[in-house]
């Protein structure tokens, strides 16, 4: 053994001995302390007996003086939900009916929102060029389509143009042009 290992073992042994001594001292200290038990007070029959009992047993508390706890009814319910928002005044049935009628009129007079084309459901799968005509291969929910410029697809779309980056289709029911990009670019809607 070298000297550093001996020194380390001596330090560990000393720490072990100090711990054992501390445990023994704590156990001896715990045995010396006693627990005081509370003895019940016999009820005193006269005021002079109470004074004598209090003088002799000044460390005990007279429980009869404590009484019962009483809650003030104006304090409210203990477990009620609270909020910081001010309370709304109650609305009568006539006011509710008038408000509902006014909302119905507003909905009827408001212009309807402009219709939009559904998002393109086509996926570009490839293209072929034969006799100066470009054909595009598209798939839509398991169905494959082959189209060239001017071809209708499902009677809802018409293929308008084909280039290296995108394919332009027209949604026929609303005459809205949509772009299907090639090479994983985002599709967009145009009017």
Image (cartoon, grey):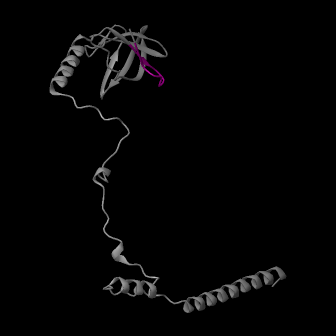
Q: Image check: 191 left or right of 27?
A: left
Placement of the N terminus among the 4 image quadrants: bottom right
Q: Image check: 28 left or right of 127?
A: right
Look at the image and give the residue range highlighted in magenta. Answer: 178-189
Farthest residue, direction right: 3
User: Going 49% across and 16% down the picture, which residue do you hit?
Assistant: 165
- Return the x and y of residue 89 as percentages of the image width and height: 26, 31
Quadrant in the rendering for residue 127? top left
Can I make out residue 40 in this image? no
- Return the x and y of residue 31 as percentages of the image width and height: 55, 92
Task: Count the numbered circles shown.
Answer: 0
Q: Image check: 152 left or right of 168?
A: left
Q: Image check: 38 left or right of 158?
A: right
User: Going 41% across and 78% down the picture, which residue do you hit?
Assistant: 61
Quadrant in the rendering for residue 147? top left
- Return the x and y of residue 172 as percentages of the image width and height: 29, 10
Quadrant in the rendering for residue 170? top left
- Return the x and y of residue 91 as percentages of the image width and height: 21, 29
Can I make out residue 143 in this image? yes
Placement of the C terminus among the 4 image quadrants: top left
Farthest residue, direction front: 48
Near-viewer residue (146 or 45): 45
Q: Is residue 81 above or below residue 59?
A: above
Near-viewer residue (39 or 35): 39
User: Going 84% across and 82% down the picture, which residue do you hit?
Assistant: 3
Q: Is residue 179 magenta?
A: yes
Near-viewer residue (108 or 189): 108
Near-viewer residue (159 or 67): 67
């Amino acid at each position: 053994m070298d000297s550093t290992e001996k020194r380390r073992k001596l330090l560990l042994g000393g720490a072990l001995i100090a711990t054992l001594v501390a445990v023994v001292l704590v156990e001896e200290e715990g045995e010396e302390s006693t627990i005081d038990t509370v003895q019940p007070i016999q009820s005193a029959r006269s005021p002079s007996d109470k004074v004598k009992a209090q003088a002799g047993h000044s460390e005990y508390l007279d429980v009869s003086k404590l009484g019962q706890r009483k809650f003030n009814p104006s304090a409210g319910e203990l477990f009620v939900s609270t909020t910081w928002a001010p309370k709304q005044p109650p609305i009568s049935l006539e006011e509710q009916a008038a408000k509902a009628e006014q909302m119905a009129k507003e909905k009827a007079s408001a212009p309807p929102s402009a219709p939009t084309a559904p998002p393109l459901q086509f996926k570009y799968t490839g293209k072929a060029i034969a006799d100066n005509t470009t054909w595009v291969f598209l798939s839509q929910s398991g169905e494959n389509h082959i189209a060239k410029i001017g071809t209708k697809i499902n009677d809802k779309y018409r293929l308008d143009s084909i280039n290296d980056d995108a394919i332009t289709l027209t949604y026929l029911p609303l005459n809205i042009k949509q772009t299907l990009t090639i090479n994983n670019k985002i599709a967009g809607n145009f009017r």
